[in-house]
Image (cartoon, grey):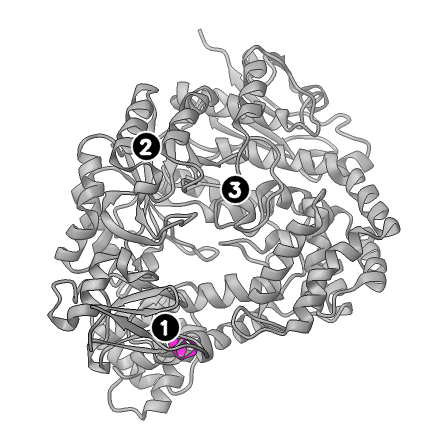
Amino acid sequence: MSAPSSTYRLQLHPGFTFADAAEAVDYLERLGVGAVYASPILDAAPGSTHGYDVVDPTRARPELGGEEGRLALSAKVSAAGLGFVLDIVPNHMSVAAPETDPWWWDVLKHGQESRYAKYFDIDWSAGPVLVPILGDEGEPTTEGDVVTYYDHRLPVSDHYRLVHWRRANEELNYRRFFDITTLAAVRVEDPEVFDATHDEVLRWVAAGQVTGLRVDHPDGLADPGGYFRRLKERSGVWIVAEKILGVGEPLPTSWPVEGTTGYDALREVCGLFVDPRAEEHFTALAAELGQETDFEAVEHTCRKLVTDSILRAEVRRIAALVEGVDRADAEAAVADVMVNFPVYRSYLPEGEQNWATAVSRVKGAEALDEQVRADPGGELATRIQQTSGMVVAKGTEDTAFYRYTRFAALNEVGGAPDRFGVPVEEFHALAAQRDAALPESMTTLSTHDTKRSEDVRARLAVLSELPEEFGDLVRRWTERHGIDEPSLNLLAWQTIVGAWPIGPDRLRDYLDKAAKESKLRTTWVDHDEEFEAAVAAWPEQVLGDAVTRGEIEAFVGRIRAAGWSNALGQKLVQLTAPGVPDVYQGTELWDLSLVDPDNRRPVDYAVRRELLARIEDWWLPEVDETGAAKLLVVQRALRLRRNRPELFRGYRPLPAEGVAAEHLVAYHRSPDLVVVATRLPLGLAAAGGWRDTVLPLPPGEWTDVLNGREAGTSVAGLLKRYPVALLVRETS
């Protein structure tokens, strides 16, 4: 089954159900979308706002409308001529409320005699299942065949042990999703388990109701390649993997998937709009404010924190498999190898060089290395590779990205904070490479997991053009209202500027999460109440200071238009470059959201419908606060991709000529399609604009589909109304 022309991500939850999604379908069709792309819709934990905590993979979630609602949505999508891409979760299930998960309840009740005992990755050699739910107060009570402890209900049985919740990280004897003890890992490498967890979704696929699959967290699986081969054979649909690739890391060639969910493209596209010449200024500012500026050192420290505390139980379980080595030495070797992985994980025998790199950085790992290489499909090799991805994700994305806040626009999932932007030539090379190798890979700019939305990053990118001015402001603001933790302080000022206007409630919630994720002064489990109180009071203090607030408003007012230019540029590039572009819900207008749950706020589709109707009637909006100009770009690009797919094949740079050529990125997707975007707009304006810069278009009549006007070679004329252009050559 072929890939969709594009996708539009919808977050389904009890407040936005199958019926609500069905109501949006006609709007999405008019927008030009190729496929509705839904968050997980199998039955999940009660009240779940995301669906990744599946409790029953055999039915559509009742809280969303159940099977009846799913079928109604499917019929609406099909009638509109759209595809339906579904997010699935093969790695884990929710065990937070055992009474809602019939498989887990049965395991707790019957232990190894349960027919589901092999479904979960439990170390039965370590004794009964550890259930870490006890607190400092209260005792479990028994009534009939049910054990109750506050909100927890479990079966009466001697097959599990109730222990204090703090013992989980040290002693847990079942694999989990990262450090979340309420998400127990599922053994989909077993064909019976694969069938049990996938049969319902595959039934939908067979009925033509699901036309594509997005696979969550494949790095947690024992055998990702084997899993994808089975899934492709059983489904035959377009499949993308939520795989975070390191810079320059290829997707394993043995995976029969069309590509990733697009974080690699996100880094490349956003990097285009960052001025690398600002790096030394931001490094100096961070150092002056007391922040560590060696990213590699910060990252290493954060990963060690994860192996030594958060994932201690996983390290111990793996070390027990190392033969002929003292247990303490084995634990040290296992932890250090995972800490030193250059990418998320290897897939031996694929990725052998990454494994070799990690081992070469660790003294005393010889026995571990020898045993893994002797049996690359064995339990030791499997578990250490499964877990290395957890160490990297928790250590780098969820900790180091909140400590190393030198330039927050780079601190994104799949990002590289130590690489200050992406040169135009590098972008062109990577885009051509994607077109040749993975032309149906997804591309994205915002997701439910991004640290900040695409438009926040677009505005922050402008700061790379004003590093000294922004640095002076941060120094002045810090002197008045500095947070007593350098990383959070620098992140806070960038966040205010990037997401302005932002109220104290949103800012307080974000900073609370950021402070806990950084694990410097407080954490999710070990609280520094005094520090947290100070952080909670900070937004009101800053936003209530008329002088500081006025300076923030004035500065944002100066850079807002440049941020809009960047936002339109990166959006048009993402929508037209090689790959299948995804639009995250609501981001067809300006969206200044931060990390979840901020980015899961309700979307006002009434406003979007009204603006879209005017755009369909050839209204050409100004680039202003409404965001209608972005909606115009999205609608024109998506409809062109859907209606004329032949235009989006191939990739070739089209260099501009003239004094301002460095401020333009342009490329052919086919001989009859050219994409044009402005970069570094403040520098462009300061230098006098485009002046005599030209874009040497091939002969023919070219029309800018954004405004319907004939296009010439003068860049000043071409980009007079909008900082971007989408040119099509008329053919007879």
Q: Main secondary structure of the magenta part?
A: helix
Q: Quadrant of residue 245?
A: bottom left
Q: Which element type, helix, strand or loop, lies under badge 1? A: helix
Question: Which numbered disc, 2 or 1, marks the residue that appears first in the sequence?
Answer: 2
Q: Quadrant of the C terminus?
A: top left
Disc marking residue 379: none
Residue that label 1 marks = 356
52 and 388: which is toward the camera: 52
Label 3 secondary element? loop
| Left or right side of 344 for 700 | right
Which is more N-terminal, label 3 or label 1?
1
Q: Label 2 is placed on what type of residue?
A: Phe
Q: Is residue 226 magenta?
A: no
* Residue at 65% from the left image edge and 61% from the top image edge: 405
Q: Determine whether 625 is above or below 234 in the image.
A: above
Quickly name the residue at label 3: 445
Disc 1, disc 3: CB below 8 Å? Answer: no
Q: Which residues are magenta?
A: 165-169
* Amino acid type for the residue under numbered disc 1: Ala
When the figure is inspected, residue 559 is found, relative to residue 153, above or below; the finding is above
Q: Is residue 122 visible?
A: yes
The three-letter amino acid code for the residue at tag 3 is Leu
